[in-house]
Image (spheres, rainbow, N blue to C red):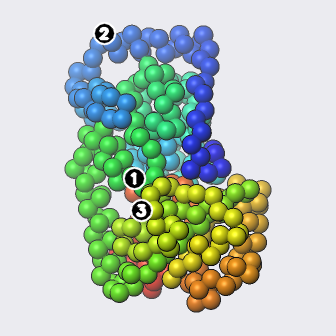
Amino acid sequence: MSKHDYDCHFYGPQMITRRLFSFLAMPAILALTMPFASARDVTHIMGTTSVPEAPVRIVALTNEATEDLLALGIVPVGAVRSANANPWFDHVAAQLADTILVGEELAPDMETIAALEPDLIIGNKKRHEKIYDQLSAIAPTVFVENITGQWRENLAVYSGAIGKSAEGEALLADYQRRVEAIQSELGDRRAEKVGLVRFIAGQNYAYNNDSFSGSILRDIGFGRPAAQDKPGLAEPITKERIPDLDGDRLLYFSYETGDGLALEEQKAWLADPLWQALDAAKAGHVYGVSDTVWATAGGIMAAHLALDDIERIYGIASTR
């Protein structure tokens, strides 16, 4: 897993051994000569794919897709490792007890995927474009474009691909219901400006409006510090720019890989005089939140957990 979900590097396609090629060749031939008895066309970022009417053996190649499938009532037969987990995020671990690990989000294990004989693979163009053809040789494959603040649109693609569009719409409607309830409870506090910063070993980031976390704040209607109130996912930030984070409240989260370096960054920044001089810090309005929830997981389940945090921070009764 990359150190930062803003990392735009792609990995190259994995080399397919002769053994794997032979394993993949027959399903590919059958897919051309024996169309599904009951199938429909699904349009997605890579084109149009014929998908079984009600696929049940689904492989998810992103953390976002995994939790969205679970929210839709589908347990994937295979999924990539949850970032920094062994192998699953806490909030999905119980539901994934019987799911087979199929590698990392940036390096799916093609042979394991093929052995699962899926009838649908869900992936991501930014992460997996170079292996799309290999995946399509295994099973019908549907991609979304990216994993950012467009998580609602992605959920709509996933739910449509598995024949559960109505259920997807219901999930988004329930999320919107909670947003509106929180807005009502916040009252004038919706005008507050909320900053976001992520600590990572070697480089820290301020998160802008098109990040997953930024999209949650936008949904509530919060303002953003001027330096973060712009399009885009995130940008590198150094200690000299700590004042750019200031607002009425400041949320921080740390991508800790187990070596303690991200937490060292966090500790150093929180002790810095520039941080201590922030209006949010002086008011006691600085809050540590989960990196999994606010930056890494990226789906509808994480969105609800982020709303839980907002309720906690602002002293609002649960709207669950």
* Residue that badge 3 annotates: 215
Residue plotted at (33% across, 28% down) = 47
Disc 3 versus disc 2: nearer the observer: 3
Specify which label sits upstream in the sequence, 3 or 2. Answer: 2
Is the Cβ of the residue at disc 1 closer than 8 Å to that at disc 3? yes
**Is residue 86 shown above or below 310?**
above
Mark drawn on residue 151: 1
Disc 1 versus disc 2: nearer the observer: 1
User: Can you give x and y, in whole percent of width and height, for residue 305 in the image?
Assistant: 46, 66
**Is residue 212 shown above or below 102?**
below
Residue plotted at (74% across, 81% down) = 273
User: Can you give x and y, in whole percent of width and height, for residue 82 in the image?
Assistant: 57, 48
Specify which label sits upstream in the sequence, 1 or 2. Answer: 2
| Whether residue 289 can be seen here | no
Is the Cβ of the residue at disc 1 closer than 8 Å to that at disc 2? no
- How far apart are labels 3 and 2 at the CA level? 44 Å
Q: Which quadrant is home to the N terminus?
A: top right
Mark drawn on residue 33: 2
Residue plotted at (37% across, 26% down) = 140
